[in-house]
Image: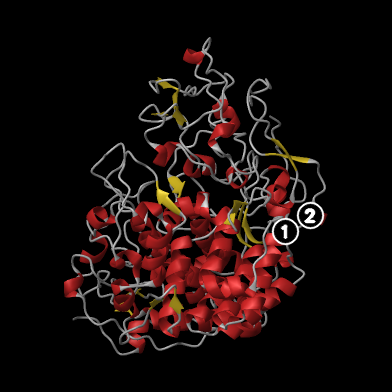
Amino acid sequence: MKKIRNITGLVFIFLLAFNISCKDEFLQEAPLSTLSPENTFVDAAGLQTALDASIKGLFNQWNGDTRELMFNSSMSEATVMGATDKPDSPGADMRTYATPINSRDNDAGRMLSFYREGYYQIKNANTVIDYIDVPEWEDAENDTERNHLLGSAYFMRAFWYMQLTMEFGNVAFPLNVVTEAKQDFKAFHMQGIWDQMINDLEYAVQHMKKKSELPIGQPPVDAARILLAKYYMLNKKFAEAEALMTTVIDDPESRLFTADDVDVDYVMVGNNENPFTGETLDGFDCKQPADPINLLHQAANSQRAQNPEGIFSIVNKAFIDGNQGRSARVRAWGPNLYSTNKGVKAPPTGTVTGINIDQNSKSKQMHKWGRGQGFCRPTNYSQYEIWHFNGETDWQDYRHKRGNWFDMDMAIYDNKDLKGTEWYGTPVKLYHEGTLLCEDSIRCFYGYPFYKFFAPNEEDQVKRQDGGKADMYIYREAEAYLVRAEARFWQDKYQSAADDINVIRTRANSKYMYTASDVQEEGVGAILDERNRELYGEEYRHDELVRMSVIYAKTGKSYKGHSYSISGSDIEKSLSAGSFYYDRVTEKSNFFRDEVPWSTYPTTKYTMDPKHIFWPVYEPYLIGNVGAVLNQTTGYDGAEDNIEPLTHVVQPAGAPNVDPMEAIGDTGGE
């Protein structure tokens, strides 16, 4: 494998882990820092360190095998948590284990880190906002650099508050860096939080720089437009959201990557050669004809970082000083072909491990497909149903084309113990003459869009090939089309919504195109289905479903016979009683709908109730707030002591904020 040591023409951003506070608290109970703002934030570069820390927090949610993006997806209808060795996961048997005292914080549960890290990164964004006028700007409050930094901090803060409100409902709402001991936080109604974020993002889209004016890895103005469009739709401003997405789509800063851009003959989707010896690996040919999908997602040659479709991307390169850990995305999202516990077994009896599990330099299937661990497993909806149209399966869609898409029979039995038998080198299968060959099919036996996750391990864990250092798209042009399609749907513009969906489907070489009647019949499900085909593994899927649940409840629109509403001013309480989210997940996820049990722990099964639209706050994060009641999420132990959330009064953008509690005259206490 060729080692890339220099990236010509690529601006690599060093995302500094800016940290000026105690590691153990995020809703701070003590003053933040002994550093003097007057000494630290004297210029744009000083403020940039705080902004970069918040961006780095976002990157951390994507990069690595147990990260938040993966868990968020598994709390949707697209995937489920597949770590079947951890029965206490709060993301599987939610009825039993999604509790305020469950401390799991790894591949099987990321509720804690979503809450904790959200406030850490809000702190970093608030740092930029609070100290924006410490430097002596050349043009004072009209300074271009000042206002870009301020707008970028608004974008990052709004990004984190979108997550917190979609996952925990009404939450504490600090808009400042805490500079003195504070133990009296209270929750605010999420509506007021959204209103403030809209106000801030409207400032951001006026002042943030274009992609071409920034190093790769910094959020440009079009990223803020996408986020603002999602906030607008929460407030039923659908025409405004549509207009924003038209601006993004028409902006020459980015564009859809199409067949006209394909300038190579083939793309490697997996490895054909042993990365240590160059020896040809047995089995399926990973050298795939190039198309606009597999080339768009190719990890090699800085393709993702330089692709014109990228709007907001994160850069991470092997052999570059300052890089981060490996992506490990095959490890997280790919099937565990190598488990010896109820995993892939060989014919005829299913008693012999089927695939070589050794981690070394000798040629094997692990080098070809990577060492997946099945932490995030597609539902039948993602694996099968979204590819069926009019009674047939669409195999010509590049996103589902064999070779881009991994199917289990592309792997072969290569356990050295099988040499000399008729099974060595033959395709893996689930059954042989009625005998089940893989008991734990949740974790170990499924297909998925391998083209998105494969990135060769060049620098570390080469023996595993489970996802090397790789650039990643956070926002790209395709999502702008799908957000506009959604905005058009809410306005009953069914043909226009279908047109936007079909732009994406045409690029993907899909066999079937949507009609206005399809969109009208399927509702927002038509947009969600296409988002799943296009953005699988690239979106915070749970949060998108919750956001749409708010819209359904506010508009009164029905979804397949279900209607929703908000009673009173507490959106959290209303959605916790019943929501589009719950109906959609139990409709589409065979695992939660059918309460599928695990073969590894037969008493463990996937369960979900309406309250699980929002997640519990880990109890130790609340009990230190001794000066006031900081609410627990509706429906969970401790919520019986909740108090009425506060109502925020929107503050003008462009300058540091006033503490929201002080602004409305709340001095803490009960």
Mark 2 vs 1, N-terminal side: 2
Q: Quadrant of residue 587?
A: bottom left
What is the three-letter code of the residue carrying label 2? Answer: Ala
Q: Nearer the viewer, residue 518 or 613?
A: 518
- Using residue 257 as the reference point, say whether residue 373 is left or right of it: left
Q: Quadrant of residue 24?
A: bottom left
Label 1 neighbour load within 10 Å: few <14, some 14-19, many 20+:
some
Q: Secondary structure at mark 1?
A: helix
Q: Does 242 sit above or below residue 467?
A: below
What is the three-letter code of the residue carrying label 1? Answer: Arg
Q: Nearer the viewer, residue 660 or 385?
A: 385
**Image spot of residue 435 (x, y percent):** 40, 27
Instruction: State the separation of the CA atoms marked 2 and 1.
Output: 7 Å
Q: Nearer the viewer, residue 472 or 541?
A: 541
Name the residue rendered at 23%, 43% in the picture: 603
The residue where tag 1 is placed is: 507
Label 2 neighbour load within 10 Å: few <14, some 14-19, many 20+:
some
**Image spot of residue 481 (x, y percent):** 65, 69
Mark yes or no: residue 257 visible: yes
- Using residue 265 as the reference point, say whether residue 576 is left or right of it: left
Which dot marks residue 2? none
Which dot marks residue 259? 2
For the N terminus, the image quarter is top right
**Image spot of residue 442 (x, y percent):** 40, 41
